Image: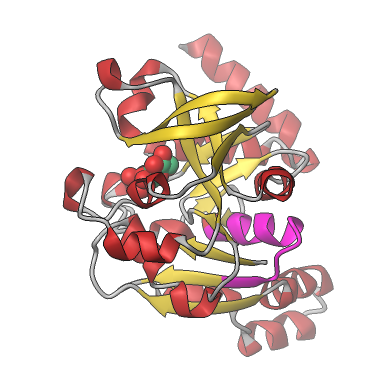
Amino acid sequence: MKAVIPAAGLGTRFLPATKAQPKEMLPVYNKPTIQYVVEEAVNSGIDDILIITGKGKRTIEDHFDRSFELEYSLNKKDKKEYLKEIQDITYMADIYYVRQKTQKGLGDAISCAEKHIGDESFAVLLGDTITYSDVPCTKQLLDVYEKYHGSTIAIERLPEYKIERYGIVDGVTVEDNIYKVNNLVEKPKLEEAPSNLGITGRYILTPDIFDKLNSIQPGVGGELQLTDAINEQENVYATTFEGSIYDIGNTKEWLKSSIDMALTHDDVHDELINFLKQKINEN
Ligand code: G1P
């Protein structure tokens, strides 16, 4: 299976930090966001990855490319640990790129993957969303897809204040934590939301999605919505994700994700906890 990572958005919610750098390159603790996303695909068994980029996103390609100067310098200084780490980034997957020419929405971005994907099901991992769990989110989705064979979406239970920012699922339970989807509503008003189950930014899609994307009209925000194309598919399932999810396009969530990721490093953990305790006392 191949994976597609849309990373073409403008990052307007994170200005001015994203004025001259892609939001997908914002560091979460010590790695750029998109590296976590690529690692999730690789840890789910996928090593053919297409990143949908756009204007101003060139540093993403540089990050996954070789850096001879850096390698030479680290080698000379005998910093073998860093050397291995940066070489691993280059070789962890076969990464391809295509540019979305105009900002016409997530649905349009996924359409750009049609030639690379062909007639197979594929994974989609939004480039500005990172997940943290023992079993990677995309692997959890693949397990459900292999059982039901339809497009499969990762969902999470949302607090009310988040509902209007997400695609929301109307479905019926088929087994614990798995729903057959009747309808998806993109960014509904709270009172019109069919549930509190929100689409998290991880999907397995069957290839008929490309025909559906070609036939839908612009939806919410005047954009071609992936959600509307999935609604046209026959067998769609949704499964609740076990783990943490962070939408790093949102400044508060980015900050929380950095803290969460930093706490997984033993050399930082105690110092950071003490700092946070001190701040709690002061406030
Ligand atoms: C997109 C999807 C939406 C989903 C969200 C998750 O919206 O259209 O259905 O819930 O990602 O982050 P966006 O955040 O690109 O507006």
Which secondary structure dominates the residues rendered in magenta? helix
Q: Is residue 215 left or right of residue 240?
A: left
Res. 8 image quadrant: bottom left
In the rendered view of the protein, which quadrant contains the N terminus? bottom right
Magenta-tinted stretch = 34-49
Residue 36 in the magenta stretch? The answer is: yes
Image x and y of residue 59, in percent: 45, 73
Q: Is residue 42 left or right of residue 131?
A: right
Image x and y of residue 269, in percent: 73, 33
Residue 215 seen in render = yes
Above or below: residue 2 compared with residue 256: below
Residue 249 seen in render = no
Q: Nearer the viewer, residue 65 or 166?
A: 166
Image x and y of residue 64, in percent: 59, 75
Q: Nearer the viewer, residue 120 or 3?
A: 120
Residue drawn at point x = 58 percent, y = 29 percent: 179
Above or below: residue 254 compared with residue 178: below
Residue at the far left in the pictured view? 222
